Image: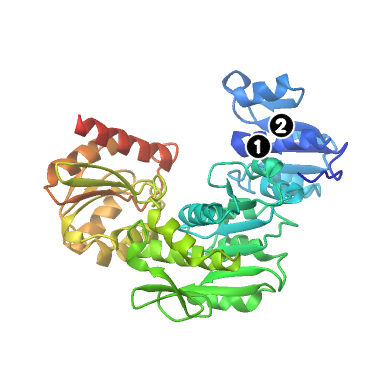
């Protein structure tokens, strides 16, 4: 860990705890800052706040009092899930207090080089693939960021021989200033989180922050399946390395079922350990990064062939009497579900879909769900999903929750079928997050097998 003194004796407010907030608070305290933590959860229900207080860090819980900002803070570090429309953040910015996220702290202290991965879909799978390939090659890819391990925590023990492989959300990237990865990947860009950002343009701008400090000595890996990425490629100082499943590019590409990097065959697409066209894209992005880091083709091939996927991302759960169950709870938008379906024969799929109603229709999904054996539909968006099913000529049944949906899907299935949870919606109408939703699916499958 680099020892830096820019926070020493500076008053810093950490807004919001969760994993990243607690990690940031402890790091700042270690760096000599005078830290105050503010979290909305009451103290008696807040073990993280209790632990911080025991360690001598000031905590203010149970709300976000604006008068707290009357203190002379030099910096605010916010939890990435807290929107910039929050009154505390608005007041801080009005007072000229810089607002960062903890990935900026991770960058400032890291001895290890950083590979940053962002995008609308495929971030977690691509991050995991890259981490596993680099580790197999002896470069120890340490996963961190939005994947669940606070970057500021992992960075404290990373050495120059390691590589920080960081999954980065648009929320995290809104709060960076000096952040500078050696390699950055943007898997794709689709209209998601518009309720947070206000427009697709603002969402893209947040993602684009990943390359702000990059130079020609750094590499930006972009998905040239998208015209938007081709346009963005002309607007960066970084050296662009494209990947594509649609055309031959000066990078990683798919041709006649084979995955190439700059004219050299790395492996066959059929050898990738997880199904779906989206995973071919994820593998190509991984290949591009691996080759830029000098990894041997055989190591890439062996690692991606053995790759079993990531929990909640088209995860194979189990097989019961010839019916296979896949948990794709992370598919919280239409594109993710489209890509999940691309890996299966629709006539054998019972799709579980529906969730948080964000006001959008699902007409884009109609071609992808046409021919499905059945659908099981639930959640706030059920009526909108049903309209898409009717346009596609797919029959459906209603469900009250994930457990009910899983049981009904199994009742509709016969040997050789697939029950696929790929909701195309966020989970927040019924569940705290997609992990809870996916875990309930897994638990119900286990009950069905008993």
Q: In x, y percent, where is residue 117? A: 56, 58
Query: Which residue is labeled 2 in the image?
Result: 37
- How many numbered marks are there? 2
Check the image and report above or below for 351 versus 37. below
Check the image and report above or below for 393 versus 351. below
Q: Earlier in the sequence, mark 1 or mark 2?
A: 1
Q: Give the residue displayed 75% in from the left and 42% down from the top.
A: 76
Q: In x, y percent, where is residue 318? A: 26, 42
Category of crowding for the residue at label 1, using alpha-carbon neighbours closer than 10 angstroms: few (below 14), some (14–19), many (at least 20): many
Q: Quadrant of the N terminus?
A: top right
Q: Give the residue displayed 54% in from the left and 62% down from the top.
A: 199
Query: Which residue is labeled 1 in the image?
Result: 21
Tag 1 secondary structure: helix
Check the image and report above or below for 270 versus 450. below
Q: Quadrant of residue 37?
A: top right
Nearer the observer, 232 or 304: 304
Residues at marks 1 and 2, CA–CA distance in whole angstroms: 8 Å
């Amino acid at each position: 860990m680099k020892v830096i003194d820019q926070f020493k004796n500076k008053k810093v407010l950490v807004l919001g705890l969760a994993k990243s907030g607690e990690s940031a608070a402890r790091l700042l305290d270690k760096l000599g800052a005078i830290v105050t933590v503010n979290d909305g959860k009451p103290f008696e229900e807040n073990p993280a706040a209790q632990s911080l207080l025991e360690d001598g860090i000031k905590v203010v819980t149970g709300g976000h009092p604006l008068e707290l900002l009357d203190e002379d803070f030099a910096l605010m570090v916010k939890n990435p899930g807290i929107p910039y429309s929050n009154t505390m953040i608005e007041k801080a910015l009005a007072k000229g207090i810089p607002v960062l996220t903890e990935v900026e702290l991770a960058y400032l202290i890291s001895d290890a080089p950083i590979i940053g991965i962002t995008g609308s879909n495929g971030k977690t799978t691509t991050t995991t693939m890259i981490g596993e390939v680099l580790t197999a090659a002896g470069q120890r890819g340490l996963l961190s960021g939005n994947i669940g391990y606070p970057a500021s925590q992992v960075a404290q023990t990373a050495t120059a021989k390691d590589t920080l492989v960081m999954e980065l959300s648009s929320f995290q990237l809104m709060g960076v200033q000096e952040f500078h990865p050696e390699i950055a990947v943007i898997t794709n860009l689709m209209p998601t989180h518009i309720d947070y950002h206000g427009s697709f343009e603002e969402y893209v701008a947040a993602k684009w922050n990943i390359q702000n400090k990059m130079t020609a000595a750094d590499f930006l890996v972009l998905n040239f399946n998208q015209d938007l990425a081709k346009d963005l490629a002309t607007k960066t100082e970084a050296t662009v390395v494209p990947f594509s499943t649609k055309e031959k590019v000066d990078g990683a590409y798919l041709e006649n079922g084979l995955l190439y990097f700059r004219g050299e065959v790395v492996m066959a697409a059929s050898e990738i350990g997880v199904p779906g066209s989206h995973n071919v894209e994820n593998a190509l992005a991984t290949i591009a990064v691996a080759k830029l880091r000098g990894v041997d083709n055989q190591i890439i091939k062996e690692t991606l062939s053995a790759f079993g996927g990531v929990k909640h991302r088209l995860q194979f759960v189990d097989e019961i009497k010839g019916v296979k169950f896949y948990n794709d709870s992370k598919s919280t938008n239409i594109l993710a579900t489209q890509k999940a379906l691309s890996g299966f024969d629709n006539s054998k799929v019972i799709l579980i879909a529906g969730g948080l109603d964000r006001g959008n229709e699902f007409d884009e999904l109609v071609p992808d769900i046409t021919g499905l054996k059945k659908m099981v539909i639930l959640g706030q968006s059920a009526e909108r999903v049903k309209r898409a099913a009717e346009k596609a000529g797919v029959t459906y049944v209603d469900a009250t929750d994930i457990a009910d949906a899983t049981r009904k899907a199994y009742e509709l299935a016969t040997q050789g079928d697939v029950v696929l949870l790929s909701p195309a919606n966020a989970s927040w109408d019924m569940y705290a997050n997609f992990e809870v939703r996916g875990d309930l699916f897994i638990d119900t499958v286990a009950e069905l097998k008993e």
